[in-house]
Amino acid sequence: MWGPEGLDEVEAELLGPPEELKGRDVLELGAGAAQCSRWLAAQGARPVALDISHRQLQHALRIGGAFPLVCADAGALPFADGSFDLACSAYGALPFVADPRLVLREVHRVLRPGGRLVFSVTHPIRWAFPDEPGPEGLSVSGSYFDRTPYVEQDDAGRAVYVEHHRTLGDRVRDVVSSGFRLVDLVEPEWPAWNTTEWGGWSPLRGGLIPGTAVFVCERD
Ligand SMILES: C[S@@+](CC[C@H](N)C(=O)[O-])C[C@H]1O[C@@H](n2cnc3c(N)ncnc32)[C@H](O)[C@@H]1O
């Protein structure tokens, strides 16, 4: 699943036709509980699920799957050059790092020539709106161009959640300057069957503004 709209890889085929996933080495970045890797393994691919959070990987372990789980920072990948055919990420790692080019350059390094990276992030336009599912989430409340990160702190003033904003142009430049060719930029539309409200995502807002941006990139 690429995002809350419900676009899944069976429908989107952004990693290529499912029958061609068999035997492919796939790196999942910011895997969380590794649901994407579990699906990839079911297609016959050989996924590696990577996350910086040991706790998330414990959930992945509990749910199960016969593929490696790696606890590491996506900006310092513990793999040799040219180890993977494909890389993917559904809202993993990239929105949470100050310089996503460090991650993209690392992914470029560990992909084989011609390898593909597909990643989804919150659509940058959302930054200008309140993160609310109702009508209050439809009026611009801040600058789309303000790159000041969103930070939540604990009582001791330590950052416990940080999200970084990149404009659409920033993201395109990040991808291209890291050595990738941008093949597609998918903005999933909110489908009629999806009546679920989840955080700031809702049928109301989804029908009016995009919520997710999926970047399809290839290593030349
Ligand atoms: C919003 S969750 C997405 C999880 C999963 N991909 C999904 O679709 O449910 C973001 C994940 O990225 C991970 N993450 C954040 N920064 C990271 C980094 N620098 N390196 C690796 N993983 C990171 C978090 O620990 C978290 O599990």
Image (cartoon, rainbow, N blue to C red):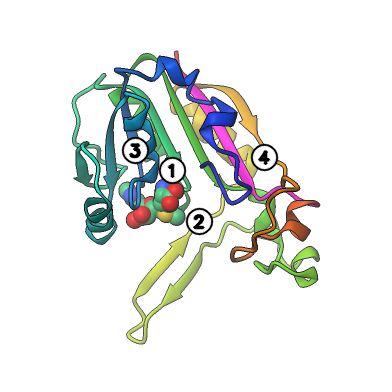
Which residue is tagged 3?
37
Q: Quadrant of the C terminus?
A: top left
Which residue is tagged 1?
100
Could you give the CA–CA distance between mark 4 and mark 2, rounded to whole angstroms?
21 Å
Nearer to us of marks 4 and 1 is: 4
Which residue is tagged 4?
188
**Residue shown at 64% from the left, 38% from the top:** 169
- Mark 4 surroundings: few (<14), some (14-19) or many (≥20) residues within 10 A: many
In primary-sequence order, the first of circles 4 and 1 is 1
Q: Is residue 117 above or below residue 127?
A: above
Nearer to us of marks 3 and 2 is: 3
Q: Tell me how many marks there are.
A: 4
Could you give the CA–CA distance between mark 3 and mark 1, rounded to whole angstroms?
22 Å
- Mark 1 surroundings: few (<14), some (14-19) or many (≥20) residues within 10 A: many
Q: Which SS class for mark 1?
A: helix
Q: Are marks 3 and 4 in contact (CB under 8 Å)?
A: no
In primary-sequence order, the first of circles 3 and 2 is 3
Could you give the CA–CA distance between mark 1 and mark 2, rounded to whole angstroms?
9 Å
